[in-house]
Image: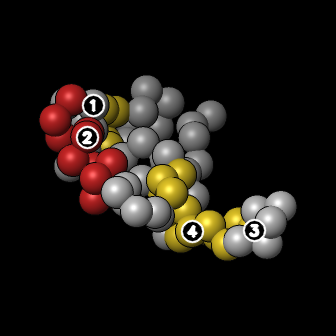
Amino acid sequence: MGIAFPTGTVSVRTADGDIVILRICDLCGAAVIEADETDLAFHKRWHRITGSGNWVDPETGKHHGP
């Protein structure tokens, strides 16, 4: 049993009625908020800096990497 990551963009509506755009990281599956000072590109830079963007799912054997 592997993890099925959603792909693309997801949006949610807050209790105040605001729409928040979430972008899904194809490296780790995290939902990254599209907002001032942060975005998916910033998140992927974090993967490169920390070396955490290169891993293999042990269940499926799928390689996730930059």
Specify whether residue 26 is in view: no
The quarter in which the N terminus is drawn is top right
The answer to whether the residues at label 4 and label 3 have Cβ atoms under 8 Å apart is: no
Q: Earlier in the sequence, mark 1 or mark 3?
A: 3
The answer to whether the residues at label 2 and label 1 have Cβ atoms under 8 Å apart is: yes
* 3D distance between C-alphas at marks 4 and 3: 9 Å
Across and down, in percent, residue 41 comes to 28, 59
Q: What element carries label 3?
A: strand
Mark sitting on residue 31:
none
Q: Earlier in the sequence, mark 3 or mark 2?
A: 3
What's under tag 2, amino acid-wise?
Answer: Trp
Q: Which of marks 2 and 4 is nearer the N terminus?
A: 4
- The image's colour scheme reads secondary structure
- In the image: residue 45, left or right of residue 21: left
- Residue topped by disc 2: 46
Q: How crowded is mark 3: few (under 14 residues within 10 Å), some or many (20 or more)?
A: few
Residue 45 higher or lower than 59, as above or below: below
What's under tag 4, amino acid-wise?
Answer: Ile
- Residue topped by disc 1: 52
Q: Which of marks 1 and 3 is in front?
A: 3
- In the image: residue 39, left or right of residue 21: left
What's under tag 1, amino acid-wise?
Answer: Ser
At 76% from the left and 62% from the top, the residue drawn is 14
Q: Which of 32 and 16 is in front in this view?
A: 16
Mark sitting on residue 13:
3
Count of numbered circles on the image? 4
* 3D distance between C-alphas at marks 1 and 3: 30 Å
Q: What element carries label 2?
A: helix
Q: Is mark 1 on a helix, strand or loop?
A: loop
Q: How crowded is mark 2: few (under 14 residues within 10 Å), some or many (20 or more)?
A: few
- Residue topped by disc 4: 21
